[in-house]
Image: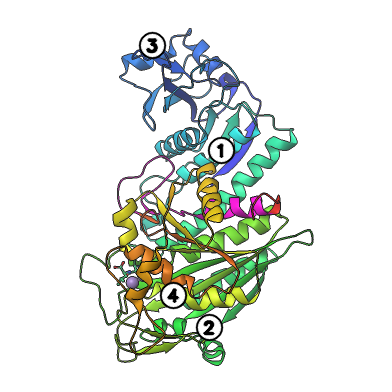
């Protein structure tokens, strides 16, 4: 893991491989550049001509743009890395003016990514307050991520940037220290979620995922309970068992309980953990299953968020439920036409074995409901329909409570995750009527993401506030890396869940 520290050192005297500075588009609307606050000493090293030099080099200040140039003489670091922040705030030259947090996070991420192979970099980006330090730290630690476990010598090209030094903060200040600690805890767990998502499905199955969760829980004082096939059978978890029936690797339901002696509220997070989704007997065609190791991204996010909450000692009880199964076709697999008796007692006619996420979630939602938490949030790579609706960078938010849905979209926005509120239209429910069972696992094709949400709603305990995050779009980035988002598993929803736990602890949610 990349290390993160605060320093008051002068940029010129710092022994590092590079100094990162921010550059923004001039607020005057001309084509000019402005050097962002934090880089004054560096600019001075160039006789105040850094903006002009960068313009000559073709820099535009666009978000994520990286320009490398030799450091001024007298600087110990050999290279300056200028990273684009997009449009400067109106009075962007003034110290203390806030740049958009997400612009800072993305710029720090892009710079950290561009510095792969370097050991140590000092970040001289605009830090107006402790929150900015946390934001920049977060972006840098997320951007430095790379998944190398399966590469020769454990290296995917260059090694990730090893050390990030934040300039412009106050290392002894309580708020700055807390912001850095938070950034480290959240990004370490988020990056671990990315590792789990990227781990190929021949190495990550329900059993090994549960073992990872068990070990982490032990390390962080989280209570953990793993229901294996035997326990699931005894408990009547027909949904999870039905999805796992075709696989040689049996399903698991993991319950992680983080409790705080000062908690007034209890949140439950439920994650879809399909370690591989082949579609089952309703097999996915070639072209649709190559990335289906990512179908446990919801469970990975929940796992990461619970551990982060524990590491931060948040004053709220958080229970995480990981609904783990591998969806495979075989002679023992669930058939289209089979009826499953779910943990809630309801029966489900399985019309399409590829609509498996809702089946494992249904059991986990009902189990989570038994504890009567103040709210339940589930996270799932649930439908291709949500990707068609919202694209690859936003997740959809559905809920049985409009205010809660709004609060989640706002919390997500606060931490730099894009989402959009989606409805649960009642008229779509009848499409799931089954002549044989209480409900079918498929309904109308149109609005498929909402149909899935309506299905889940039936398995939430009476009177419990619930929201559903369909992260099918942003969970796995098949395109080029951008900002602090790498190729592959992204760890989406981790930061939103952590923020929800923080807001709940502060009494600002529900
Ligand atoms: N895991 C998939 C959804 C998915 C697709 C996630 C692409 C990420 C990328 C899910 O289990 C699924 O197969 N859903 C079906 C449901 C349908 C059969 C009702 C879908 O969306 O096609
Ligand atoms: Mn599926
Ligand atoms: Zn799936």
Disc 1 on helix, strand or loop? Answer: helix
Q: Is residue 78 left or right of residue 355?
A: right
User: In this image, 158 relative to 189: left or right?
Assistant: left
Q: Secondary structure at mark 2?
A: loop
Mark 4 and mark 3 lie on one chain; the one further toward the N terminus is 3
Indicate yes or no whether the magenta region holds residue 233. no
| Distance in Å between CA atoms under marks 3 and 2 | 67 Å
- Near mark 1 (Cα within 10 A), the count class, few <14, some 14-19 or many ≥20, is many
Please name the residue that numbered disc 3 is placed on: 52
Residue 79, horizontal then vertical, whole percent: 44, 25
| Residue at mark 2 to residue at mark 4: CA–CA distance | 25 Å
Q: Is residue 112 visible?
A: yes
Does label 3 or label 1 sit earlier along the sequence? 3
The x, y position of residue 35, in whole percent, is 47, 17
Q: Which mark, by number, is residue 205? A: 4
Whether the residues at callouts 4 and 3 have beta carbons within 8 Å, the answer is no
Quadrant including the C terminus: bottom right
Indicate which disc residue 135 carries.
Answer: 1
Q: Residue at x 54, y 59 (%)?
A: 401
Residue 152, located in which quarter of the rendered image?
bottom left
What percent of the width, then of the height, locates residue 379?
A: 48, 63
Q: Does the residue at mark 2 contact the one at mark 4 (Cβ under 8 Å)?
A: no
Give percent across and percent down for residue 262: 79, 58
Q: Which residue is mark 2?
A: 344
| Residue at the spot 34% in from the left edge and 58% down from the top edge | 386
Distance of label 3 from label 1 (alpha carbons): 28 Å
């Amino acid at each position: 893991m990349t290390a993160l520290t605060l320093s008051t050192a002068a940029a010129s005297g710092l022994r590092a491989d590079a100094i990162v500075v921010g550059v923004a588009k001039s607020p005057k609307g001309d084509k000019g550049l402005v050097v962002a606050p934090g880089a004054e000493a560096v600019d001075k090293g160039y006789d105040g001509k850094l903006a002009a030099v960068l313009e000559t080099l073709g820099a535009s200040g666009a978000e994520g743009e990286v320009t490398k140039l030799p450091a001024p003489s007298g600087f110990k670091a050999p290279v300056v890395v200028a990273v684009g922040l997009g449009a400067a705030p109106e009075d962007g030259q003034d110290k203390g003016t806030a740049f958009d947090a997400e612009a800072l996070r993305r710029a720090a991420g892009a710079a950290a990514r561009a510095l792969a192979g370097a050991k140590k970099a000092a970040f001289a980006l605009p830090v107006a307050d402790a929150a900015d330090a946390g934001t920049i730290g977060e972006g840098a630690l997320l951007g430095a991520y790379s998944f190398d476990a399966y590469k020769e010598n454990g290296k995917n090209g260059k090694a990730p940037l090893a050390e990030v030094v934040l300039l412009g903060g106050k290392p002894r200040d309580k708020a700055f220290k807390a912001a850095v600690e938070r950034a480290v805890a959240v990004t370490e767990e988020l990056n671990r979620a990315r590792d789990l998502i990227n781990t190929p499905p021949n190495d990550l199955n329900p059993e090994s995922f549960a073992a990872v969760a068990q070990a982490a829980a032990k390390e962080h004082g989280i209570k953990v309970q793993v229901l294996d096939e035997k326990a699931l059978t005894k408990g009547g978890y027909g949904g999870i068992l039905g999805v796992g029936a075709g696989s040689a690797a049996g399903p698991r339901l993991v319950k992680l309980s983080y409790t705080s002696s000062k908690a007034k509220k209890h949140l439950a997070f439920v994650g879809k953990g399909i370690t591989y989704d082949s579609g089952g007997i309703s097999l996915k065609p070639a072209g649709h299953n190559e990335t289906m190791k990512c179908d446990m991204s919801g469970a990975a996010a929940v796992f990461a968020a619970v551990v982060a909450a524990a590491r931060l000692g948040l004053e709220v009880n958080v229970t995480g439920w990981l609904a783990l199964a591998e969806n495979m076709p075989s002679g023992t697999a669930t058939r289209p036409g089979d009826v499953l008796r779910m943990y809630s007692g309801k029966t489900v006619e399985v019309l399409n074995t590829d609509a498996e996420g809702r089946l494992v979630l249904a059991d986990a939602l009902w189990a989570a409901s038994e504890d009567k938490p103040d709210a339940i949030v589930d996270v799932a790579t649930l439908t291709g329909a949500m990707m068609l609706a919202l694209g690859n960078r936003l997740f959809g938010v559905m809920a049985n409570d409009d205010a809660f849905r709004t609060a989640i979209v706002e919390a997500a926005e606060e931490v730099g995750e894009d989402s959009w509120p989606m409805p649960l239209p009642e008229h779509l429910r009848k499409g799931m009527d089954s002549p044989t069972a209480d409900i079918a696992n498929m309904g109308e094709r149109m609005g498929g993401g909402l149909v899935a949400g309506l299905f889940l709603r039936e398995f939430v305990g009476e009177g419990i506030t619930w929201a559903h995050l369909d992260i099918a779009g942003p969970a796995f980035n098949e395109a080029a890396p951008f900002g602090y988002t790498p190729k592959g598993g992204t760890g989406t929803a981790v930061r939103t869940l952590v923020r929800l736990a923080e807001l709940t602890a502060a009494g600002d949610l529900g």
